[in-house]
Amino acid sequence: MSLLTAFNLHCQTTPDTIAFIDGERQLSYRQAGQLASQLSAYLAQGQIPCQRVVIALERGIDAAVAILAVLTAGACYIPLDIKNPPNRLNYIITDADAQIIIGTGDRPDWLETSARWLDINHLPPAPGKPSQATANNGDALAAILYTSGSTGTPKGVALSHRAMRNFADWAASTFKIGASDHIASLTPFYFDLSVFDLFSSLSVGATVHFVPAGLNLSPSRLTAWLAGHHISVFYTVPSLLSFIALKGALATTPLPHLKTILFAGEVFPTQPLQTLCGLLPTVDFYNLYGPTETNVCCYWPVERERLQNGQPIPIGRPACGSLLQIDDVTGELIVQSTNNLSGYWQQGKLNPALTTDNSYRTGDKVSLNGHGEYCYHGRLDRMLKCSGYRVEPAEIEAVILQRPEVSHCAVVGVTDSTSGQRPAAAVVLKPDAKLEQIVKPVKQQLPAYMHPCKFIVLESMPYLANGKTDYRALQKHLENS
């Protein structure tokens, strides 16, 4: 079944209910459905099953309608972070082999592909009737979400209608989301957290409120906005919630309508979570765990009384019907789930990512506690989590090594109180080269969340006895520098 089946039903049964609110603009379910259907007519009149359409729009109503239109046309959406450097955007568009790009205004100068550009605000006369080609095949791809890649380039996590709907339905049921709920949507659509904001909400006829840009930088204004819009459910990353606990003026800003806070994407330190729970005593908190490849495969309803000892919180028990296993040798978490990705989209085709029994190896080390709950113990590889973003150090290293001034480099994660981790770089420069020659060019090629928070220059890299880079020694050096 399609990811839009429930949304389309609400367009018919509760057409006047407000679906989206974005500043002064709002759309009812009827209006959202009509706009999505009309836009889908421009996507080759809906005759593009399994083709890929890039969404080059800021988070908001236009981007949401574009996503609904792509799915209505039977195609797959690929959301961009349009603040990324042009080289990264062009790589993603080319790698996806996208046929159409939906944006605003004229075709941008940086765009190198021959893909068709559609200005969502100035469409030509409709080429045909509005499309009703919504995919009914659950295995059809619904979205490709590009994340940082360990090979030095972004990689696309391909998700089917069945996978995304399985999570959306589970979340709506588990967290008792209903038509009367007001959902705060702050997560960009290229994050898997947005599947809840968009599809869990629309599946039950709830109202999605797009949080104004910049409010995440002003927690007291954000809490005032949550209060003013009667927000009942908020799904975000722990780093922002920690900021709200510290600077959100919650002692003087009551949130009587807020009933549920979900968080995911990184570890939530126990102390700020305990503080936030104390400031919001009537709110239910849930820790949701899972890489983009599985969306959520584990969750923990926060038990306030267990926060007293300051121990790390568990990731909990299986979610979304997942079957979880722990590798006996490495402690790696292995996930069998309907949520699992269909594969990695690379160079215009879908490549396998699952084992022969359709399991996904997460690369995360876990254990079971005395309550029968899974506990997270970090990565088995080098991947970092920075404010909910997945960052592969190898991708940053590849950019640094392109600089002619650099002979060697290594990137590790250092602890950051606001974002959990930040990448930091150690470099060995060629004779007469200066550090300032590389810092700006490197940052210009990387998205902001991948910018190294510090650079240090070494005469040589530290190595282990086996000749491999000693990342632990580097991390200690960078933490203390």
Image: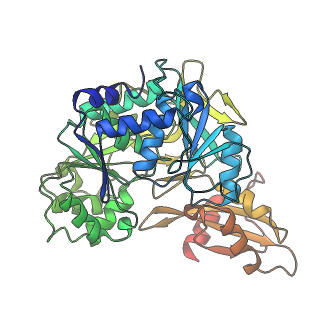
Quadrant position of residue 363: top right
* Pick the front one: 145 or 78: 78
* Pick the front one: 72 or 360: 72
Q: Is residue 258 above or below residue 38?
A: below
Q: Position of residue 441 (x, y in %)?
A: 72, 71
* Pick the front one: 459 or 154: 154
Quadrant position of residue 34: top left
Residue 425 visible in the displayed image:
yes
Q: Position of residue 475 (x, y in %)?
A: 60, 65
Residue at 48% x, 22% y is: 135
| Quarter in which the N terminus is drawn | top left
Residue 336 visible in the displayed image:
no
Q: Is residue 132 above or below residue 264?
A: above
Number of marks in picture: 0
* Pick the front one: 405 or 79: 79
Q: Is residue 5 above or below residue 383?
A: above
Residue at 55% x, 35% y is: 42
Quadrant position of residue 13: top left
Tell whether 57 sits left or right of 406. Answer: left
Q: Position of residue 432 (x, y in %)?
A: 86, 82
| Quarter in which the C terminus is drawn | bottom right
Q: Position of residue 326 (x, y in %)?
A: 47, 31
Residue at 41% x, 28% y is: 3
**Direction right: furthest residue:** 431
Residue at 49% x, 37% y is: 39
